Amino acid sequence: MSGPLLRFAPSPNGRLHRGHAYSALLNAQLAKAFGGGLLLRIEDIDLARSRPDFVAGIHTDLAWLGLVFQGPVHRQSEHFSDYAAARDRLAASGFTYPCFCSRGQIAARIAALEGQGRIIARDPDGTPLYPGTCRGLPKEAVQARIAAGEPHTWRLDMGNALRALGEPLTIRCCAVDGTEATRPANPARWGDAVIARRDVPTSYHLSVVWDDAVQGITHVVRGQDLEAATDLHRLLQHLLGLPVPAYHHHALIRSGDGEKLAKSKGSESLADLRARGVSAEEIRQSLGFT
Ligand code: GLU
């Protein structure tokens, strides 16, 4: 498919709520306004939290809202070998390294460093940056530990990655009227982020940039909660030589008391709303769509 291409990419680890509806409807509105297509991607790399009934719920809710998607549905759990190949490319170029630390070990190391008066920066999500314990481990020891089956993640070597940049990266930001501006990308604030998890050969960050590229996505329209992650995505695109889409990060829909809607907080789902007689038309109107 050529021309503008957008996607809605929910994770099936809960029921969709009004925030998802807003994002999906905005994607559809902009796809139409830009004269482009709209794809559906199911981001189900989290095998412990993804459930078939949540996938079915996504399809039911989106059809109920009147949304139509082009082409086959892309399910990330069917593409682990592609992500593994991308992960291995990054490792072969020296942009990542295996990390054997458990969460507890990382927390203990950070507490020890802070106890010595060291200031550990936080990433945009508020998590302390990885202190680099496994960066620079001797190659033979690393190989032996992997051969012995020791669980490990793969972390970006942010220092190496940044040194490989010719010039500072920028992000193309797209407004709803299609006009574009650029802003500087600041991936360093994520430190040595996890690029591939222990249980699957990928992470949200790696899969999302890979799929946006292979699916030919030209405009990524998603919530503001993912705006800072775009800096890391832009770096991965550069390191993997992938095309770069434009990004629009929309404001989040909040509950009456100003809280961000979240599956984990039990926000009322679209299915709940439907069950108590709210129509799809009322949902669309309440979110500002006609
Ligand atoms: N799967 C992510 C979510 O449900 C969205 C990812 C994206 O749009 O980049 O929050």
Image (cartoon, rainbow, N blue to C red):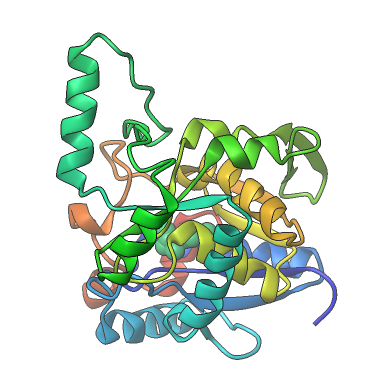
Where 188 sits versus 243, above or below? above
Q: Answer yes or no: is residue 115 visible.
A: yes
Q: Image quarter for residue 35?
A: bottom right
Residue depicted at x 64% and y 46%: 235
Viewer-side residue, 150 vs 106: 150
Residue depicted at x 59% and y 83%: 68
Relative image position of residue 59 (x, y in whole percent) = 42, 84
Relative image position of residue 85 (x, y in whole percent) = 56, 74
Where 195 sits versus 269, above or below? above
Indicate the quadrant containing the C terminus: top left, top right, bottom left or bottom right.
bottom right
Q: Answer yes or no: is residue 285 visible.
A: no
The outermost residue toward the top is 117
Relative image position of residue 140 (x, y in whole percent) = 40, 56
Horizontal relation, residue 66 to residue 177: left or right: left
Q: Image quarter for residue 211?
A: bottom right
Where 103 sits versus 189, above or below? below
Viewer-side residue, 239 vs 274: 239
Where 89 sits versus 139, above or below? below
Viewer-side residue, 173 vs 159: 159
Viewer-side residue, 177 vs 165: 165
Horizontal relation, residue 221 to residue 255: left or right: right
Indicate the quadrant containing the N terminus: top left, top right, bottom left or bottom right.
bottom right
Relative image position of residue 156 (x, y in whole percent) = 50, 47
Residue depicted at x 71% and y 49%: 176
Residue depicted at x 43% and y 81%: 64
Q: Image quarter for residue 133?
A: top left
Horizontal relation, residue 127 to residue 36: left or right: left
